[in-house]
Image (cartoon, rainbow, N blue to C red):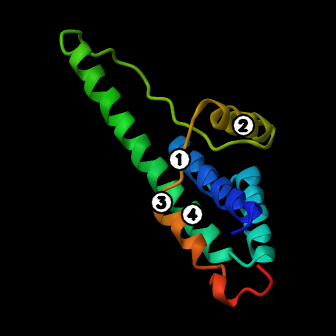
Amino acid sequence: MTEEKKNLLKEAYQFGYFVGFRGHSEWVEWVRQKREELYQKAEELGIYELVKDAYRKGKELGKRDREEKLYESLVAKVEREEAKPRPKGAVSVATSARPEESSKLEREYVEFLQSTKLTMPPELLNTLKHLEPPKMLRLGD
C-alpha cells in the first residue's frame, strides 16, 4: 500500500468526521468541492470505493459523537436550569452557510484537524492490504 493511498484514505475519513461532527450540509459549496476532489484523487489511484466508504464511516462516527455531546450538554443544562424559571422569547432559526461564510468554514475545518486527533478505524486500514498483490506474485522484490 502506497503512502499516498493511506493519506488519501485518512483525509477522507477525517473530512467525513468533520462534516458529521459539525453538522455541515454536503451541499455547501466548499464541502461539495472538497469531497469531489477526494473522490477524484481516489478514482485516479483506483481506491474510489474505499475512500467513499472511509468518508461515509467518518461522517457517521462524527454525527454519532456530535449527538452524544449534544445529549450530554442538554442533560447538564437541564440539571443546571431545573430551579430557574424558563424565559419567554423567540427561538432563533439557523440559516445555511452563505458564500462569504465558506472560507470561514474551511478555516474551521483546518483548525478542527489541528485540534483533534482522529485515529483511523482498523477495518479501513485492513482493507488497504487487499489492494496489493501477494508478495509471491511480485517480481523482483
> Between 71 and 54, which is closer to the camera in this rendering?
54
Amino acid type, label 4: Ala
Where residue 39 appears, x then y in whole percent? 73, 68
Q: CA distance from mark 2 to mark 4?
A: 19 Å
> Between 31 and 131, which is closer to the camera in this rendering?
131
Which residue is labeled 1 in the image? Answer: 119
For mark 1, give the secondary structure.
Answer: loop
Amino acid type, label 2: Val
Name the N-terminal-most of marks 2 and 4: 4
Q: Residue at x 75, y 34 (%)?
A: 107
Which residue is labeled 2 in the image? Answer: 110
Q: Residue at x 52, y 68 (%)?
A: 126
Q: CA distance from mark 4 to mark 1?
A: 12 Å
Label ID, residue 122: 3
For mark 3, give the secondary structure.
Answer: helix
Name the N-terminal-most of marks 4 and 1: 4
In this rendering, which labeled residue sits more in front, label 1 or label 2? Answer: 1
In this rendering, which labeled residue sits more in front, label 3 or label 4? Answer: 3
Which residue is labeled 4 in the image? Answer: 54
Amino acid type, label 1: Thr
Q: CA distance from mark 1 to mark 3?
A: 9 Å
In this rendering, which labeled residue sits more in front, label 4 or label 1? Answer: 1
